[in-house]
Amino acid sequence: MVPTILVVVVLALYPLAFSVAAALNDSSLGKPFNGWVGLENVESVLGDGDVIGALIRTTIYALAVTAVSVLAGLAIAVALDRTTRGGSLLRTIFLLPLLTPAVTVAILWKVILSPSGGLLSTVLTDLGFDGSALSPLSSTALALPTIALADVWEWTPLVTILLYAALQAVDWETVEAATLDGAHGRTLLLGVILPTIAGAIAAVALIRLVLAFKVFDLVAVLTAGGPGQSTTTASYLIFQRALQQFDVGQASVITLLLAIVVTLVTLPFVYLMRRAHA
Amino acid sequence: MSSTRMRHGRLGPIGVLVLAIGVLWVLIPLAYLLSMAFMTRTEVISGSYLPATLQWENWQAVVEAGIPRTIGNSLLVAVGATLITLVLATPAAWAIARHGAGGKALSAVILAPWLLPPIVAVVPIFVLLRVAGLNNTLLGITLVYSLVNVPVAVWLLEGFVRRLPGEIEEAGTVDGAGDLGLLLRIVVPLIAPGIVAVGIIITVLSYNEYLLASFILLQPEVHTLPVAISLFQGDRFAHLGRIAAASVAGVLPVYAVAVLFQRWLVSGLTSGGVK
């Protein structure tokens, strides 16, 4: 079994080791390790307002998307857990967004929000407004929330499915005992059932958070980071630096910075998860 | 059945409302995409909910643009990669779950790269493939996917191995089976449902992957579906109806999976996710 474990470890560490090495060297796309520069890349990245801006933007985006996904996903999971008929059909429907390629999810929303003949503009026009005036993807204020909307559509079903499974696994004797103590309805849900699956909720929030931090495909297809830098998330910035400006050294530093930010932001969730399981 | 149903409470009007909103939220965008796939250019631009008559010219354009071949490429790559991933990941998952190989640290190491955006892997993989002369080949992207998905597969499979009662393997050891025999003759048949479930998930992940494919596959004849779709939507001659048709064609294989394997998908997703 040792060889397969070795393969797994090498696979896991190769990108990380490559990033650290590239960060400390003058690295372009053609020549990754072009001479040692020490912390020069780190210094220039830390002084770069675009990088800091993208990291802050990504963090806010990830937290907001996670909050919406977890709340909506939990509500649907609780309802799904109580269905007596049609559960299988409903689960299949809720799996669809999860299985849709992100590129297609992006196109789906592009089509809906298109100012010339999209669903939103058609509905607005029928209601007597000027539908063609609204173009969320070319607005600095609305572009990122629009990507968030597509992101929520794509990944909330994962939250639903995972929390649904957690609800199905709740020990029914605990719930029974609480019912005998007079808990029912909302009290039962908020006071007994949700605390029982708190660990699962923290775990799912963690998964969701990491997925949101990594958003790339939606940005690439919907806005290419614009207008301005309003949708330049960390992943997209890394892509621009590495594959459009060919500065792999700087891209690697941003990658490592992002890893640190993700770790810091997710730590409270890891703590919650551990405490719930203890 | 009735007792299990009573336990978490009844589905009240709020619950029904939540489910109704959820279903509409998922289905309306998809229904609109499907409807648009059958519209003429004029209908699209003037803003319509449904096509007056079903137009097949969008679909003809999709076939002419070679979308079916890219779906074939994607399926080939996804299935091939999944088979290799499972061969690598199953023994690793067993070793970690059963023998505690590597301890807690190993589990952390395996999941660490998942925290990083996949863009990190583009440059190192690109360099590796260039050295191996596998850029722009379906074999190259198959190998990349098969390796990239190993950590996720190990993570998901581990949950299934842990649920096996240990005595079964002990009995096998007494019968004198070696590690490999034990794995192939006892463990694999017992966790076969888990292997299938994880296999389906990994296949879908590979089928949908865009970032790596868009850098490794530059020639049209090796494009996978997500790459082809993203280029198709950027083409200014392709109107929204055609883009919608291409998108619908591309998701049909994965939606078939959802309908046929819903149970397996749910069990595979939940084994690793919330343990």
Image: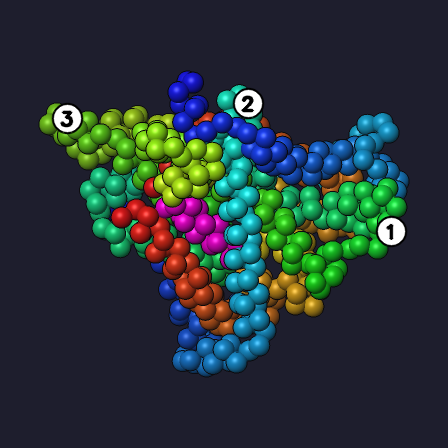
Q: Nearer the viewer, residue B8 or B224?
A: B8
What secondary structure is found at the residue carrying circle 1? loop
Vertical placement of A278 versus A182: above or below?
below
Vertical placement of A114 versus A193: above or below?
below
Subunit under mark 1: A
- What is the three-letter code of the residue carrying label 3? Ala
Mark positioned earlier in the residue sequence (1 or 2): 2
Majority secondary structure in the magenta region: helix
Residue at 73%, 51% (x, y): give it. Answer: B234
Q: CA distance from mark 1 to mark 2?
A: 40 Å
Query: In this figure, which residue is indicated by the disc labeled 2?
Result: A86
What secondary structure is found at the residue carrying circle 2? loop
Query: In this figure, which residue is indicated by the disc labeled 3?
Result: B171
Subunit under mark 3: B
Q: Which mark is residue A266?
A: none
- What is the three-letter code of the residue carrying label 2? Gly
